[in-house]
Every structure is written in structure tokens, then in C-alpha cells.
Image (spheres, grey):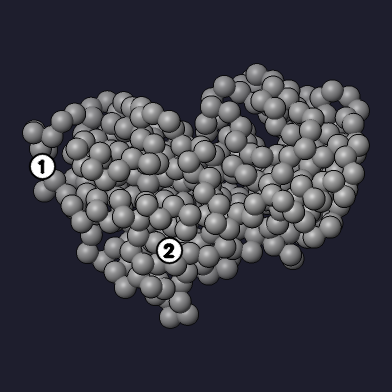
């Protein structure tokens, strides 16, 4: 039930013809995108504002969403970036001292088309069986034939370059917490706010730059390290990133990538990527580290993966080695270069939302930067 009484009837239609009835929530209209599901019980505001969800209709599998309302601190970008939002029930009366409004009010204010009172369990099971697919949310007044035609005309996620639409248009800086020991250039392919924040807590002054920034522009900054962020879309649709990553790595600059950044790093060194059946979206994915044989519970949001061969090597990339595996389906979750200071993970160590098991990777990055400077401060390096 929405915050505004009896919502008007609405429905979700999938490209294979499956239809799910519900009630309108948030803004009214038609929303199109790839329909995926997220298994997190909390963190819905972070999900809504995660640029990696651009172009997707996100289904929350937990039945009651909005319990603690929304606030001014939990957003991972300036506004929601999802194409649409699907829930079983939106909380009518949020309860939290941090709350500044309800989920329904938030969705309406930001123009997000959403739907509630829908059988999200059946929808999730269908997507697990058939895979993520294009779909639409529409008022009941829109005919199924009309919506189906619009869904069919909507682009598939494969081959889609979405990072340019969510990347910052101009560079900006996030100052270090305390003394600035390192200067990090962060490629914004859809960066979440918590990634630069955690880097600053490790003593990094972070300069966030547009995804189109060239290797020459970055080298002119003489950075201690480069962070390649998460983001939406198909990594194969951003071929120019591969050349930039290779050029920077050959100069010995430590590079750390997550999610889309992980896929881009893999492709830069010859690896292949592919579309997962329904992706990994949640905050409870167990990942095994092959170095030390430990398990971390991780936050994940991606629809593509780097290809791993049956013998455990990374397909097409002899210079890379696997470092982490997903214990649900055995997919590659981490890699590193065998001779250059380059590493990446498929999951989200900044975990917003999610567990904090993998935050040590930000410290690993600063250790690589320290080693690249010979363990000494370089007084000539600009701060």
C-alpha cells in the first residue's frame, strides 16, 4: 500500500509475456529497462541511488521495503538512478530517528516510477528460471500490446554503454581525512559515494574524473594510484578504457578496480566478459579468497563477469591470475596482474549497503601505492 492511500492499478510486463499486477507507487507513467532482483533486506536507498542500476527495473525480494524511511545521508549519488522500482509492500509509516520522509514520498519527489502490491516472490522465481530480461512498468490504462511494443524496441543490456550517462561531467576532489599521504585519481564510470569516502579514510586525496579522461591527462597529475569504479552497462562497450588502463599500468601506477572496473581491467589485459543469466545483486554473497583460503560475505551488483576457464585460469589473459571465487556459482570474483601493481574485485568492498568484510582491500591499495614509492614519501610529489 502506498503512502497516498489506494494507488491506481499498474502492472509489470516482461518481454516473454509474463504479467504481474500491482499498484502504482511513486511517480506515474511508463518505465522500461532490464528487470533484475536484489536480495538485500535493507539498503534500499543505496540501491535506488547506485549508478550501477542505471537502465534497470530493480525488484526487492524482501517483502517490506521502506521500514526506516529515507534520509539525507544514505544516498550513493545525488538522486535515484534506477529506471524503476518494484516492491511487495512499501512501509506506510517509517520508523527511525534518521528518517526524513517515506519511501513513497521520496520516489514521487524524484520522479521514479514504481509499483507495489506485486508478487515479487513469483517474479523473482521467474527471473531465476528464465534470466534477467527487458520489461516495463505501466498504469493499467496502458494496453499490454502497447507496452509490449515499447519493451521490444528498448535496447538490451548487451552492448549497451551506460557509464557515460552517469559519469561526472567535471572533475572534483574529496579531501583526505587527516594528513594526505596519497593522491588517487578515481575514474567515475558510476562511482558510489562511499568508495572515495573510504579512500579518504586511508589518507588519500581523491580526484574524481569523468570516464572519458585520457591516460595523458592522468599522467600529467602524477598520481600515486588510480581507482576504476563500478558502473552500469556492458564492459565490452567501453573499449577505450582498456588502452588507458594498460598505459597507466605500464608506468607502474597501482590500479584498483571494482565491479565494472574489475571487468574493464580484465578486458584491458585480454580477458573476455560475458552476460550472467540473472546477475548478482545482494549483500550476502560468499566469496572465497584463494590467497589464504578465507571466506568473506560481500555486497554485489553486476550483470556481467570475467570468463574463467575450467582449469581456473582467466580466459585470454595469461598475465592475470584469479584471486577470488563466488561460492554460489563459481564465477570469478577477483584478479590481479602477475607482475604489475594491478588488482580488482567483482564485488563491492565499499559495501553500501552490505557487510564490511572486504574493506581491507582499500588498505591493500594504499600499501601498493606505498610500495610503488619505495616505502618512502616522495617530497617532490604534488599534494
At x 30%, y 51%, the residue is 244
Residue 266 drawn above or below residue 260: below
Judging depth in this view, the residue of 175 and 267 nearest the camera is 267
Tell me, yes or no, if residue 161 can be seen here: yes
Residue 254 falls left or right of residue 201: left
Q: Residue under label 1, please give it.
A: 376
Helix, strand or loop under label 2: strand
Point out residue 228 in the picture as x, y percentages from the top left corner. 37, 46
- Vertical side of 251 occupied by 65: above or below: above
Q: What residue lies at 42% left-to-right and 44% top-to-bottom?
A: 229
Where in the figure is residue 340, as x and y percent of width and height?
Answer: 23, 59
Q: Residues within 10 Å of mark 1 (few under 14, many from 20)?
A: few
At horizontal 69% and vertical 62% (from top left) the residue drawn is 131
Horizontal arrangement in the rendering, residue 34 relative to residue 290 (left or right):
right
- Near-viewer residue (124 or 215): 215
- Asked if disc 2 and disc 1 are in contact, CB closer than 8 Å, the reply is no
Of 316 and 90, the residue lying toward us: 316
- Packing grade of label 2 (10 A; few <14, some 14-19, many >=20) is many
Q: Which quarter of the rendering shows the N terminus?
A: top right
The number of discs equals 2
Which quarter of the image is occupied by the C terminus? Answer: top left
Q: Does dot 1 land on a helix, a strand or a loop?
A: loop
Task: Give percent across and percent down for residue 348.
Answer: 48, 48
Q: CA distance from mark 2 to mark 1?
A: 30 Å
- Residue 324 — which label? 2
Amino acid at each position: 500500500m502506498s503512502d497516498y492511500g489506494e494507488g491506481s492499478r499498474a502492472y509489470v510486463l516482461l518481454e516473454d509475456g509474463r504479467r504481474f499486477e500491482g499498484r502504482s507507487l511513486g511517480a506515474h507513467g511508463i518505465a522500461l529497462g532490464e528487470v533484475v532482483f536484489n536480495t538485500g533486506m535493507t539498503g534500499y536507498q543505496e540501491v535506488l541511488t547506485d549508478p550501477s542500476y542505471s537502465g534497470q527495473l530493480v525488484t526487492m525480494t524482501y517483502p517490506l521495503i521502506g521500514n526506516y524511511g529515507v534520509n539525507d545521508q544514505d544516498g550513493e549519488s545525488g538522486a535515484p538512478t534506477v529506471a524503476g522500482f518494484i516492491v511487495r509492500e512499501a512501509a506506510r509509516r517509517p520508523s527511525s530517528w534518521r528518517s526524513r520522509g517515506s519511501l513513497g514520498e521520496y520516489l514521487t519527489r524524484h520522479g521514479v516510477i514504481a509499483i507495489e502490491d506485486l508478487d515479487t516472490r513469483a517474479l523473482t522465481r521467474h527471473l531465476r528460471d528464465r534470466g534477467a530480461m527487458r520489461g516495463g512498468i505501466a498504469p493499467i490504462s496502458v494496453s499490454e500490446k502497447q507496452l509490449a511494443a515499447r519493451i521490444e524496441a528498448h535496447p538490451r543490456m548487451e552492448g549497451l554503454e551506460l557509464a557515460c550517462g552517469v559519469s561526472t561531467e567535471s572533475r572534483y576532489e574529496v579531501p583526505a581525512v587527516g594528513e594526505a599521504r596519497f593522491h588517487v585519481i578515481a575514474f567515475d564510470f558510476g562511482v558510489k559515494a562511499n568508495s572515495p569516502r573510504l579512500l579518504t579514510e586511508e589518507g588519500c586525496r581523491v580526484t574524481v574524473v569523468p570516464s572519458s579522461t585520457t591516460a595523458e591527462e592522468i599522467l600529467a597529475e602524477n598520481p600515486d594510484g588510480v581507482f576504476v569504479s563500478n558502473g552500469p552497462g556492458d564492459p565490452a562497450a567501453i573499449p577505450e578504457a582498456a588502452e588507458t588502463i594498460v598505459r597507466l599500468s605500464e608506468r607502474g601506477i597501482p590500479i584498483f578496480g571494482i565491479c565494472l572496473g574489475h571487468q574493464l581491467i580484465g578486458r584491458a589485459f585480454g580477458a573476455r566478459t560475458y552476460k550472467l543469466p540473472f546477475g548478482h545483486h545482494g549483500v550476502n554473497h560468499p566469496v572465497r579468497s584463494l590467497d589464504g583460503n578465507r571466506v568473506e560475505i560481500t555486497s554485489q551488483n553486476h550483470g556481467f563477469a570475467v570468463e574463467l576457464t575450467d582449469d581456473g585460469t582467466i580466459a585470454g589473459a595469461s598475465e592475470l591470475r584469479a584471486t577470488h571465487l563466488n561460492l554460489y556459482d563459481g564465477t570469478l570474483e577477483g584478479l590481479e596482474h602477475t607482475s604489475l601493481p594491478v588488482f580488482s574485485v567483482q564485488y563491492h568492498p565499499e559495501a553500501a549497503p552490505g557487510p564490511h568484510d572486504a574493506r581491507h582491500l582499500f588498505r591493500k591499495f594504499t600499501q601498493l601505492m606505498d610500495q610503488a614509492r619505495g616505502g618512502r614519501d616522495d617530497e617532490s610529489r604534488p599534494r
